[in-house]
């Protein structure tokens, strides 16, 4: 019983240290933006970029097929530094910036490249979360769909796809995530589609979040390995029983 308790406690400690190593606060910077903590989508398409620790988000482009063109300066992008192993971006739209009135669709494509400094093959997944959607009272229907294609850096090979759909009177959409073989750089292509089903419908997207997943740093893996080795050694110790 004592050995089992010790093994269990050591396992919890090992996993906790490993997770904390992956969730430590990162460093974010912006280049070519008026604010140090974020960039507008317009600034990014004009050549600005952002970094989260050793991950670079750059080479931005936008294609807009909306009924009424989206004002890119009304969409602000924040680099996320709360999880070192899962750097990402949060898109925050000003009121009405990503909004469909009646049958007028918002149809916006955003693309950018994600790369690791040093060229290490450590980008190994991605996730997508739509967190702020509003359907006006009295809407006949409508939808918000955010779709992301993850491509290899050649712009052709598809690594995976993420799709999040929000509908009226439905539970909040769950985050989508996927994993793929490690890469030093990828291309992210995202489409935002917002539309109503009736002339009086009003559908709004306030924010959504994208992240990439990275293979943990060798240092954090070493912590986990040392802890698990200690657990194994504890388990091999002989149990000395007192004579009856």
Image (spheres, helix red, strand yellow):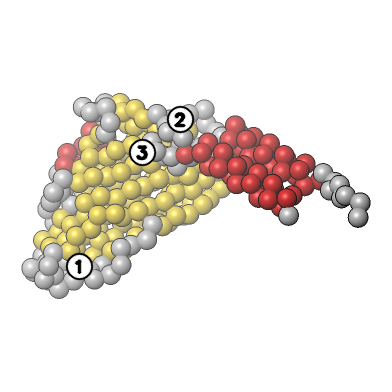
Estimate how packed mark 2 is, as few (under 14), some (14 to 19) or many (20 or more) residues with alpha carbons within 10 Å: some
Residue at position x 11%, y 71% in the image: 138
Residue at position x 38%, y 36% in the image: 81
Question: Which residue occupies the foreground of this view, 178 or 110?
Answer: 178
Image mark count:
3
Say if mark 2 contacts mark 1, CB within 8 Å. Answer: no
State whether residue 239 appears in this view. Answer: yes
Question: Disc 2 or 1, which lies upstream in sequence?
Answer: 2
Label 2 belongs to which residue?
54
Disc number lying in front (2 or 3): 3
Check residue 142 in the rendering and tell me which mark sits there, or answer none. Answer: 1
Check residue 80 in the rendering and tell me which mark sits there, or answer none. Answer: 3
Q: In what quadrant of the picture does the N terminus appear?
A: bottom right
Residue lying at the far left in this picture: please name it: 200
How far, Cα to Cα, is label 2 from label 1?
Answer: 40 Å
Q: Is residue 164 left or right of residue 53?
A: left
How far, Cα to Cα, is label 1 from label 3?
Answer: 30 Å
Estimate how packed mark 3 is, as few (under 14), some (14 to 19) or many (20 or more) residues with alpha carbons within 10 Å: many
Disc number lying in front (1 or 3): 3
Image coords of residue 180 (percent x, y): 53, 50
Q: Quadrant of residue 91?
A: top left
Say if mark 1 contacts mark 3, CB within 8 Å. Answer: no
Residue lying at the far front in this picture: please name it: 244
Residue lying at the far bottom in this picture: please name it: 140
Image coords of residue 102 (percent x, y): 10, 65
Q: In what quadrant of the picture does the C terminus appear?
A: bottom right
For mark 1, give the secondary structure: loop
């Amino acid at each position: 019983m004592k050995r089992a308790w010790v093994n269990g406690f050591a396992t919890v400690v090992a996993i906790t240290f490993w997770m904390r190593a992956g969730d430590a606060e990162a460093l974010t910077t912006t280049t070519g933006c008026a604010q140090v903590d974020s960039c507008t989508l317009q600034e990014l398409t004009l050549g600005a970029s952002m970094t989260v620790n050793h991950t670079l988000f750059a080479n931005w482009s936008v294609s807009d097929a909306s009924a009424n063109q989206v004002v890119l300066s009304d969409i602000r992008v924040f680099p996320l530094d709360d999880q070192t192993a899962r750097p990402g971006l949060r898109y925050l739209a000003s009121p009405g910036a990503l909004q469909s009135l009646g049958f007028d669709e918002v149809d916006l494509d955003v693309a950018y490249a994600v790369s690791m400094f040093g060229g290490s093959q450590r980008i190994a997944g991605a996730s997508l979360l739509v967190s702020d959607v509003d359907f006006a009272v009295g809407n006949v229907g409508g939808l918000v769909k955010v779709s992301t294609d993850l491509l290899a850096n050649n712009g052709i090979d598809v690594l995976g796809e993420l799709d999040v759909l929000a509908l009226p009177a439905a539970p909040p959409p769950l985050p989508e995530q996927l994993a793929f073989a490690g890469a030093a750089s990828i291309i992210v292509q995202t489409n935002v589609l917002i539309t109503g089903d009736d002339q009086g419908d009003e559908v709004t997207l306030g924010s959504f979040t994208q992240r990439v997943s990275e293979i943990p740093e060798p240092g954090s893996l070493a912590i986990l390995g040392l802890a698990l080795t200690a657990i194994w050694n504890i388990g091999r110790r002989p149990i000395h029983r007192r004579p009856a």
